[in-house]
Amino acid sequence: MMMNPPHPGELLDENINALGLTIEEAALRLGVSCEELANVAKLQAAISADLALRLEMAGMSTAQCWLRMQINYDLAQAKRQLPRQVRALC
Protein backbone atom coordinates (compact mmCIF):
# COMPACT_ATOMS: atom_id res chain seq x y z
CA MET A 1 0.00 0.00 0.00
CA MET A 2 1.23 3.47 -0.85
CA MET A 3 2.07 5.76 2.06
CA ASN A 4 0.02 8.61 0.64
CA PRO A 5 -2.33 7.26 -2.05
CA PRO A 6 -4.39 9.81 -3.94
CA HIS A 7 -8.12 10.12 -3.44
CA PRO A 8 -9.84 8.38 -6.39
CA GLY A 9 -11.75 11.59 -7.02
CA GLU A 10 -8.51 13.09 -8.38
CA LEU A 11 -8.36 10.46 -11.12
CA LEU A 12 -12.08 10.75 -11.75
CA ASP A 13 -11.82 14.51 -12.20
CA GLU A 14 -8.80 14.13 -14.52
CA ASN A 15 -10.67 11.54 -16.63
CA ILE A 16 -13.79 13.69 -16.89
CA ASN A 17 -11.70 16.70 -17.94
CA ALA A 18 -9.68 14.62 -20.43
CA LEU A 19 -12.94 13.56 -22.09
CA GLY A 20 -13.92 17.22 -22.44
CA LEU A 21 -16.94 16.77 -20.18
CA THR A 22 -18.26 18.91 -17.37
CA ILE A 23 -19.28 17.38 -14.06
CA GLU A 24 -22.90 18.03 -15.06
CA GLU A 25 -22.53 16.18 -18.38
CA ALA A 26 -20.72 13.26 -16.76
CA ALA A 27 -23.31 13.03 -13.98
CA LEU A 28 -26.11 12.95 -16.53
CA ARG A 29 -24.40 10.19 -18.50
CA LEU A 30 -23.70 8.17 -15.36
CA GLY A 31 -27.20 8.66 -13.96
CA VAL A 32 -26.07 10.26 -10.71
CA SER A 33 -26.63 13.69 -9.24
CA CYS A 34 -24.25 16.52 -10.04
CA GLU A 35 -23.77 17.02 -6.33
CA GLU A 36 -22.68 13.40 -5.77
CA LEU A 37 -20.18 13.45 -8.62
CA ALA A 38 -18.86 16.91 -7.75
CA ASN A 39 -18.33 15.90 -4.12
CA VAL A 40 -16.22 12.92 -5.19
CA ALA A 41 -14.28 14.98 -7.75
CA LYS A 42 -13.62 17.66 -5.09
CA LEU A 43 -12.33 14.94 -2.71
CA GLN A 44 -15.18 15.61 -0.29
CA ALA A 45 -16.86 12.19 -0.63
CA ALA A 46 -15.85 8.61 -1.20
CA ILE A 47 -16.56 6.58 -4.31
CA SER A 48 -19.52 4.34 -3.50
CA ALA A 49 -20.01 0.83 -4.85
CA ASP A 50 -22.90 2.18 -6.94
CA LEU A 51 -20.76 4.90 -8.52
CA ALA A 52 -17.91 2.44 -9.08
CA LEU A 53 -20.28 0.13 -10.98
CA ARG A 54 -21.61 3.02 -13.04
CA LEU A 55 -18.06 4.09 -13.93
CA GLU A 56 -17.28 0.54 -15.02
CA MET A 57 -20.42 0.38 -17.15
CA ALA A 58 -19.39 3.70 -18.74
CA GLY A 59 -16.02 2.22 -19.73
CA MET A 60 -13.89 3.88 -17.08
CA SER A 61 -11.86 0.99 -15.62
CA THR A 62 -13.41 -1.59 -13.30
CA ALA A 63 -15.54 -1.16 -10.21
CA GLN A 64 -12.98 -3.18 -8.27
CA CYS A 65 -10.21 -0.79 -9.32
CA TRP A 66 -12.18 2.28 -8.17
CA LEU A 67 -13.08 0.64 -4.86
CA ARG A 68 -9.48 -0.54 -4.27
CA MET A 69 -8.29 3.04 -4.78
CA GLN A 70 -10.89 4.23 -2.25
CA ILE A 71 -9.95 1.56 0.29
CA ASN A 72 -6.23 2.35 -0.05
CA TYR A 73 -6.96 6.04 0.46
CA ASP A 74 -9.23 5.36 3.46
CA LEU A 75 -6.71 3.02 5.10
CA ALA A 76 -3.88 5.52 4.69
CA GLN A 77 -6.02 8.25 6.26
CA ALA A 78 -7.04 5.98 9.16
CA LYS A 79 -3.44 4.89 9.75
CA ARG A 80 -2.40 8.51 10.22
CA GLN A 81 -5.10 9.01 12.86
CA LEU A 82 -4.76 5.65 14.65
CA PRO A 83 -3.86 5.97 18.31
CA ARG A 84 -0.60 4.27 19.27
CA GLN A 85 -2.12 2.70 22.38
CA VAL A 86 -3.82 -0.30 20.75
CA ARG A 87 -3.07 -3.55 22.56
CA ALA A 88 -3.37 -7.15 21.39
CA LEU A 89 -6.67 -8.89 22.12
CA CYS A 90 -5.12 -12.26 22.91
Image (tube, rainbow, N blue to C red):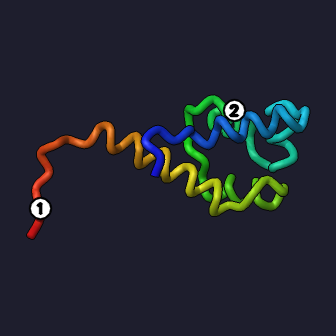
Q: Is label 1 or label 2 in front?
A: 1
- Give the residue type that dot 2 points to: Ala
Mark 2 sits on what residue? 38
Tell me: 3 left or right of 80: right
Depth order, front residue of 44/64: 64
Q: Residue at x 69, y 32 (%)?
A: 38
Give the mark nearer the N terminus: 1 vs 2.
Answer: 2
Name the secondary structure under disc 2: helix
Give the image quarter of residue 14: top right
Q: Residue at x 63, y 63 (%)?
A: 64
* Placement of 72 over or under 44, stated as above or below: below
Q: Residue at x 49, y 50 (%)?
A: 72
Q: What is the crowding at mark 1: few (fewer than 14 residues within 10 Å), some, or many (at least 20)?
A: few
Q: Residue at x 76, y 54 (%)?
A: 55
Give the image quarter of residue 59: bottom right
Mark 1 sits on what residue? 88
- Give the residue type that dot 1 points to: Ala
Tell me: 34 left or right of 69: right
**C-alpha gap between disc 1 and disc 2:** 41 Å
Tell me: 67 left or right of 71: right
Tell me: 27 left or right of 46: right
Indicate the quadrant containing the C terminus: top left, top right, bottom left or bottom right.
Answer: bottom left
* Placement of 15 over or under 89, stated as above or below: above
Image coordinates for residue 20, horizontal then vertical, percent: 90, 32
